[in-house]
Image: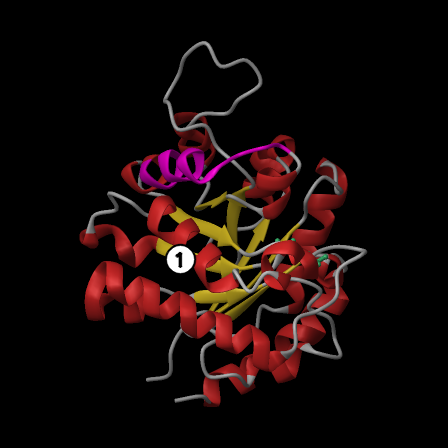
């Protein structure tokens, strides 16, 4: 049996309730003929849309994630959202440590670690994002950066929970409107580094942890990225925010992913 393919989008701070529901309903409809036994399709919209989003599409069609989460169940944390609140809505995935959380909101690896442990302890899938800045890349510190982010971010994770752990490699310099997409060779090389670190942490069980690529994935480069041996899925921003466009990327890349050994 071929491996599970992971294709998803982070909607960042763009779509409100109405647009998110319309987008999800359309995407679910466009992709309804694709057998979900080989495809995990997921969307991570903004917090305020999550309840309506969950009602709009079943998780058998599209898994839903939160873009962030506080690690405590409740408390004096004004402006934060707790795991219990997200459980109540029926959210599947918690995205942790997106580069915008790290580099705009100032989160560090120790914060991400508390969120990873809390997400896993509350039964969610934890999607930890890692990636080097341009400066770290230019100083030839990419591998060390990835290793540090993973070793701290995943510290204390129990092997029994790694079936719910996903990693996204998102080089900071490749993300967003000013991003330069990573070449397929570079992305694949860094995915191999990530897989090596995961293997060091969890042994051969780490083979099952999907490593997704994100950062300026677009209709032109999606297929060549999908061909690379160490890339298990794509985590897309701008190019997936239109349901028709995302559907095209899904249909172009899914068979390529499936064919890989
Ligand atoms: P872009 O695809 O818009 O570069 O965003 C990627 C991303 O941040 C996914 O989390």
Q: 63 above or below 248?
A: above
Question: In the rendered structure, does residue 112 fall within the stretch colored magenta?
Answer: yes
* Residue 60 appears in the picture as rendered: no
Q: Looking at the image, in which quadrant does ligand 1 appear?
A: bottom right
Q: Secondary structure at mark 1?
A: helix
**How many numbered callouts?**
1
Q: 59 above or below 122?
A: below
The residue identified by callout 1 is: 147
Q: From the top left corner, tell me how far across and down residue 74 is, in percent.
A: 39, 16
Q: 124 above or below 207?
A: above
Q: Which residues are magenta?
A: 105-117
Q: From the top left corner, tell me how far across and down residue 50 is, in percent.
A: 58, 37
Residue beneath the point at 57% across and 46% down: 98
Q: Residue pushed farthest front?
A: 139
Residue beneath the point at 40% across and 33% down: 87
- Dividing the picture into quarters, in which one does residue 261 lie? bottom left
* Residue 19 appears in the picture as rendered: yes
- Dividing the picture into quarters, in which one does residue 171 lie? bottom right
Front-most of residues 39 and 79? 79
Say if disc 1 is inside 8 Å of ligand 1.
no
Residue 117 relative to residue 79: left or right: left
């Amino acid at each position: 049996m071929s491996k599970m393919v992971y294709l998803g989008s982070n909607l960042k701070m763009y779509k409100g309730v109405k647009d998110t529901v319309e987008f999800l309903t359309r995407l679910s409809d466009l992709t309804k003929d694709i057998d979900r036994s080989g495809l995990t399709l997921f969307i991570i919209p903004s917090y305020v849309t999550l309840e309506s989003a969950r009602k709009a599409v079943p998780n058998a069609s599209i898994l839903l994630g939160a873009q962030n989460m506080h690690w405590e169940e409740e408390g004096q944390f004004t402006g934060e959202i707790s795991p219990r609140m997200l459980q109540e809505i029926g959210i599947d995935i918690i995205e942790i440590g997106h580069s915008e959380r790290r580099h705009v909101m100032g989160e560090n690896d120790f914060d991400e670690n508390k969120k990873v442990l809390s997400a896993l302890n509350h039964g969610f899938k934890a999607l930890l994002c890692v990636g080097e800045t341009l400066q770290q890349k230019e100083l030839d510190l990419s591998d060390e950066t990835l290793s540090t982010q993973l070793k701290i971010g995943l510290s204390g994770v129990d092997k029994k929970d790694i079936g719910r752990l996903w990693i996204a490699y998102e080089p900071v310099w490749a993300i967003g409107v000013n991003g330069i997409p990573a070449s397929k060779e570079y992305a694949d090389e860094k995915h191999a580094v990530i897989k090596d670190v995961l293997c060091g942490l969890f042994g051969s069980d780490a083979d099952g942890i999907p490593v997704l690529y994100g950062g300026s994935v677009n209709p032109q480069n999606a297929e060549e990225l999908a061909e690379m041996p160490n890339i298990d899925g794509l985590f897309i921003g701008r190019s997936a925010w239109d349901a028709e466009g995302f559907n095209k990327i899904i249909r172009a890349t899914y068979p390529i992913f499936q064919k890989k050994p």
